[in-house]
Amino acid sequence: MTHKILIVEDDIAFGKMLATFLERKNFSVTTTSTGTDGKEHLKKETFDLLITDLKLPDTNGMALLEHVKETYSNTRVILMTGYAEVNTAVEAIKKGALDYISKPFRPEELLMIIEQASESLEKPVTEHSKKSSSQQKPASSSSTEPKAVQKEESKPKPSESNFVTGISESSKKFNQYLKLVGPTDMCVLIQGESGTGKEVAANAIHKFSNRSNRPFVAVDCGAIPKEIASSEFFGHVKGSFTGAVNDKKGHFEAADTGTLFLDEVGNLSYENQVQLLRALQERKIKPVGSNTEIHVDVRIISATNEDLTKAVEEGRFREDLYHRLNEFSIHIPSLRERSEDLFLFTEFFLEQANQSLNKNVMGLSKEVEAAFKQYAWPGNLRELKNIIKRSVLLTPGEQIPLDVIPREVVTAKETETKTTDFSKESNEKQLILNALKETENNKSRAAKLLNITRKTLYNKLEQYDIEL
């Protein structure tokens, strides 16, 4: 059947372009430029889909969404929005919108969203499905209201996924790389600042791979003492050393046929680097105290927040191991590099916090939104997640107020973030200097302020030649 689409867009030329494109794809399209005219068209005809701009001359897309939800329950709604309005659009999803698309976009992107919803749109809509004003009632969660149910099922829930796609250009490029390298067996090196979500990215690569139904084992290399690293990676047999009271399976064997993620791989000792290189080259391991080699089929994804090329030059990291791990490298953008995604992540962490703390905080106050926009987020996503969870716990009402936000976020000067050099090294060094000044050179407190470990801070002090 031919689906009927109503487009409400005050940019006449853009609306006409969309209509022409969709008509070529065999959709029946009606266009209008105001919310009032849109309502008139909805009274006269039955539409499968309404595509509306969030900002209209006489109303807004949110109000039109609510009108459609109350009166025309079988008409789905897609919002078109600018980057700055994405947090509002995400709120619209909660109110039953099918999806939203950020301007500027190509018509093909809109078509992809429509096609993804095609199964839902295939359900016939009759004139009798329109409700009169006397029949209006709140939208139910029954099978007669597939729109809200479908969107709710397709939204990533915190328990299902920690991956937020993002809409910024840097996020799009980053996501493209993840999907590109995922189906291969290449070793991937993920590089980026602390707190950017490197393990989440590694898990996403695993999910895109042919090993997605096999084990994903994550190892924090910085937390393993070098004395027991061999046992942790390769396992041991009972009695091989004091305290080895049972046989133990190592991380390599646990990840067999799957993916082994080595986080902060730059923190491995030189001796452990040699052992790791041999395991990668031979695809065989020997548990501590055993004479039997075990063949393992493991894909390696590693991550670091330091410059490994510099570590190689300084002799702290083996060059042959670096090239073995770096068959394909991915830079994971900092939160500063994808500021357009800030409120997408905020919304996601807010949902997580509500679920964890059994609360129902709906969003941020305008003052908090403004503070978030001008803050530099040196701790990246980890810092944002922690602040959101703390704020949700302290919030008595539906919106997070300014007085529960940490002082460093509230007092950040907009002029400072605008003039900051966001090249990785210069900015990171300045953030460390600022943290040390703030804490009067107390390294433990500075590391906590930066949301990194003390060991990482010491490495950074050496890397940037910072003397106290």
Image (spheres, rainbow, N blue to C red):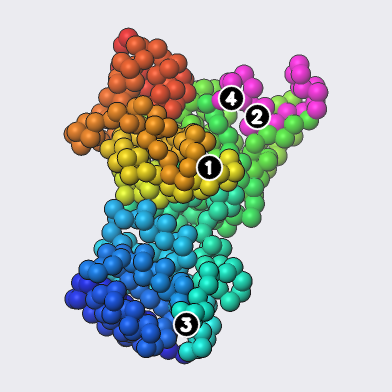
Secondary structure at numbered mark 4: loop
Q: Alpha-carbon distance for marks 4 and 3?
A: 67 Å
Answer yes or no: is residue 147 visible. Answer: yes
Q: Residues within 10 Å of mark 4 (few under 14, many from 20)?
A: some
Q: Is residue 99 left or right of residue 248?
A: left
- Left/right placement of residue 298 relative to residue 436 reads right
> Which badge, 2 or 3, comes first in the chain's sequence?
3
Q: Amino acid at mark 1?
A: Ala
Task: Identify the amino acid type marked 3.
Answer: Ser
* Mark-to-mark CA distance, 4 and 2: 8 Å
Residue 107: horizontal and vertical position, in percent?
31, 72
The residue shown at (64%, 52%) is 214
Mark 3 — residue?
132
Q: Are marks 4 and 2 in contact (CB under 8 Å)?
A: yes
Identify the mark at residue 353; answer none if there is no mark.
1
Say if mark 2 contacts mark 3, CB within 8 Å: no
Write the residue at 47% across / 46% down. 398
Residue 444 position within the rendered picture, expressed as x and y whole percent measured from the top left: 45, 16
**Where are the magenta residues, as a range?**
223-246
Q: Residue furthest front?
A: 134
Quarter of the image holding residue 24? Answer: bottom left
Mark positioned earlier in the residue sequence (4 or 1) = 4
Check residue 232 in the rendering and tell me which mark sits there, or answer none.
Answer: 2
In the drawing, what numbered circle is on residue 90?
Answer: none
- The residue that disc 4 covers is 224
For label 3, count other residues whose C-alpha is less than 10 Å away and answer few (under 14), some (14-19) or many (20+): few
Quadrant of res 140: bottom right
Q: Which marked residue is nearer to the observer: mark 2 or mark 1?
A: 1
